[in-house]
Image (tube, rainbow, N blue to C red):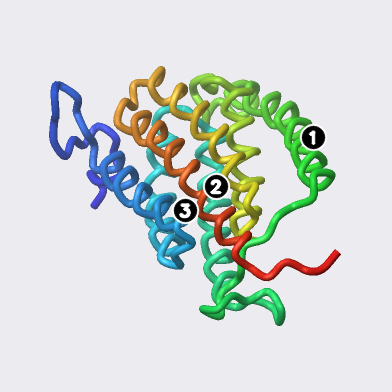
Amino acid sequence: MKDFFDIDSIFFTVLGYPMSYLEFVGTVVGAFATWWSAKANIWSWPAGLISVTTFFFLFYQIQLYPDMFLQIFFFVMNLVGWWEWTHPKTGEEDQKSELKVSQLSQKQFAVILFAGSLATVLFGTIAGNLHEWFPILFNKPSSFPYLDSFTSVMSIVATFLLIRKKVETWYVWLLVDAISAYMYFVKGLKVVGIEYAFYCLIALVGAYHFTKEFRSYPQPAR
């Protein structure tokens, strides 16, 4: 079991690329979780719990510290999302008695994006100094402190929007996934990078599916 959580413990090698157990499990299970989310399938949440646990250990070992801390948040939010989707409030349920899809107002969306930008500056500064403040825990500088912090912050935003089944979650995820794919390729995690490039396509599917479902509901008279 200890070897499983070591990024140097190789599961198999394909086309000269060594695939660790951590990267393989996190990638495959994460792909299922993301696809199920795009289809508003409740199984996305338990699959997400498995994926974020493996990525926590992986990100620590490649010095993507904001991403590492983000997995703790994701673990808790997967539990919250699982509950929210299966226990909607009166008037928020769909035909399956699950939480139905909804949209933000333009003002709400703008405020959320502005707050996310401010948080990026704050956490990017913190991430850039972790190796100096806590050298025992973080013996190497953070990779891409601001870019990594941006994807981490906006992933939090997107997760809250997904928990509430907001259409806008998929536009945020599209931006996050595109930037993440770039970072992972640069850090040598080619399979994870390919996965996140694929997530961009899933985000488009999610935006289409959520929008279509939202428009299928009876709209209130104006």
Number of marks in the image?
3
Estimate the x, y position of residue 198 in percent, counting from the top left. Answer: 38, 36
Disc nearest the viewer among 1 and 3: 3
Q: Position of residue 14 (x, y in %)?
A: 14, 29
Q: CA gap, disc 2 to disc 1?
A: 21 Å
Residue placed under numbered mark 2 in the picture: 207
Q: Which residue is mark 1?
A: 114
Task: Report if the CB atoms under discs 3 and 2 are less than 8 Å apart.
Answer: no
Of the pair 45 and 104, the residue shown nearer to us: 104
Frontmost residue, 97 versus 213? 213
**Left-right relation of 168 to 23:** right
Out of 67 and 185, give the one closest to the viewer.
185
- For image coordinates 26% across by 42% down, the residue present is 24
Q: Residues within 10 Å of mark 1 (few under 14, many from 20)?
A: few
Disc 3 is placed on an element classified as helix
Mark 1: secondary structure: helix
Quadrant (top left, top right, bottom left, bottom right) of the C terminus: bottom right
Tell me which label, 2 or 1, sits earlier in the chain.
Answer: 1
Determine the residue positioned at 33% across, 43% down. Answer: 27
In x, y percent, where is residue 182? 45, 22
**Amino acid type at mark 2:** Ala
